[in-house]
């Protein structure tokens, strides 16, 4: 069964450094998402991406964050200057397309980001 | 106001018994979808079951079923014949048709522990 792939599984970075989290969504999916989960807390939406542009973003997704689909397969999340509070599990998700509500988002296994 | 509320932070269930995990939601959209995800200790998010706001019947998927009470705005997950492998965090999430990004809004989760 096709799946969403995220790399790396764990990233340790010094505060103030840039980090790029990578995702390969399921190949025929058209909608892409990033979520984060701070340890012990609920999953929070960051950004959604469709047709090569951001369709929605949350308050968390400030100008330190950016997303890109550099080619036909990868979908990346960049944090420009990391802060301690960016430490979290970051999930990429994808969905096949259309407005039908019953299409689930399929999640990757996550990247655990630790900021020192 | 919280859009998704899961009031049980943790629950125990005896192996082979059934358990109900509560979820209430708040929306003014006439059309929405409700999803349940399982998050084992390894961290990945696994889609379990979906219920649409216009679905006449409660959703079922193997040992998982939804007790959907639209007037009460609740969508409780029922796991029958619990297994040790069911021990995990369970998240209820909602997608509203009028949200441009089609993102999921998650509840705080319930940690289920299955006792042998």
Image (spheres, coloured by chain):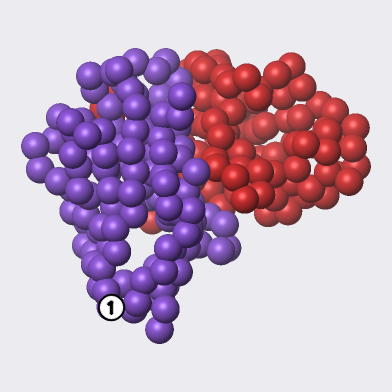
Chain colours: A red, B purple
Q: Visible in this render: residue A38?
A: yes
* Residue drawn where x is 48% and y is 53% of the image: B9
* Residue drawn where x is 72% and y is 24% of the image: A65
Quadrant holding the C terminus of chain B: bottom left
The outermost residue toward the left is B56
Identify the chain of the residue marked 1, using the numbered disc in the image. Answer: B
* Residue drawn where x is 47% and y is 59% of the image: B10
Indicate left or right for A106 with B60 as reference: right
Indicate left or right for B71 with A56 as reference: left
Where residue A43 appears, as percent x and y from the top left, is: 54, 40
A60 vs A6, nearest the viewer: A60
SS for callout 1: loop
Where residue A90 appears, as percent x and y from the top left, is: 63, 42
Dot 1: within a 10 Å radius of its alpha carbon, few (fewer than 14), some, or many (20 or more) residues? some
Location of residue B54 by image quarter: top left
* Residue drawn where x is 53% and y is 48% of the image: A108
B1 vs A25, nearest the viewer: B1
Indicate left or right for B77 with A4 as reference: left
Q: Visible in this render: residue A30?
A: no
Where residue B17 appears, as percent x and y from the top left, is: 27, 74
B44 vs B27, nearest the viewer: B27
**A85 is higher (above) or lower (below) than B90:** above
Where residue A94 appears, as percent x and y from the top left, is: 46, 37
**A36 is higher (above) or lower (below) than B109:** above
Residue placed under numbered mark 1 in the picture: B16
């Amino acid at each position: 069964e096709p799946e969403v792939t995220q790399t790396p599984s764990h990233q340790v970075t010094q505060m103030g450094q840039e980090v790029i989290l990578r995702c390969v969504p399921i190949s025929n999916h058209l909608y892409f998402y990033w979520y984060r989960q701070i340890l012990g807390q609920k999953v929070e939406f960051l950004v959604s991406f469709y047709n090569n542009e951001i369709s929605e973003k949350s308050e968390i997704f400030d100008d330190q964050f950016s997303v890109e689909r550099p080619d036909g397969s990868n979908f990346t999340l960049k944090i420009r200057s990391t802060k301690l509070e960016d430490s979290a599990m970051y999930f990429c998700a994808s969905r096949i397309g259309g407005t039908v509500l019953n299409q689930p988002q399929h999640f990757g296994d996550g990247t655990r980001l630790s900021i020192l | 106001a919280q859009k998704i509320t899961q009031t049980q932070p943790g629950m125990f269930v005896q192996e082979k018994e059934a358990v109900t995990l509560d979820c209430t939601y708040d929306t003014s959209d006439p059309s929405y979808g409700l999803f349940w995800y399982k998050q084992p200790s390894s961290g990945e998010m696994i889609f379990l079951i979906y219920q649409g706001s216009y679905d006449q019947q409660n959703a079922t998927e193997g040992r998982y079923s939804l007790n959907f009470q639209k007037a009460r705005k609740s969508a409780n997950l029922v796991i029958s014949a619990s297994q040790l492998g069911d021990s995990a965090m369970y998240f209820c999430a909602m997608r509203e048709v009028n949200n441009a990004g089609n993102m999921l809004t998650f509840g705080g989760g319930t940690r289920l522990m299955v006792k042998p």
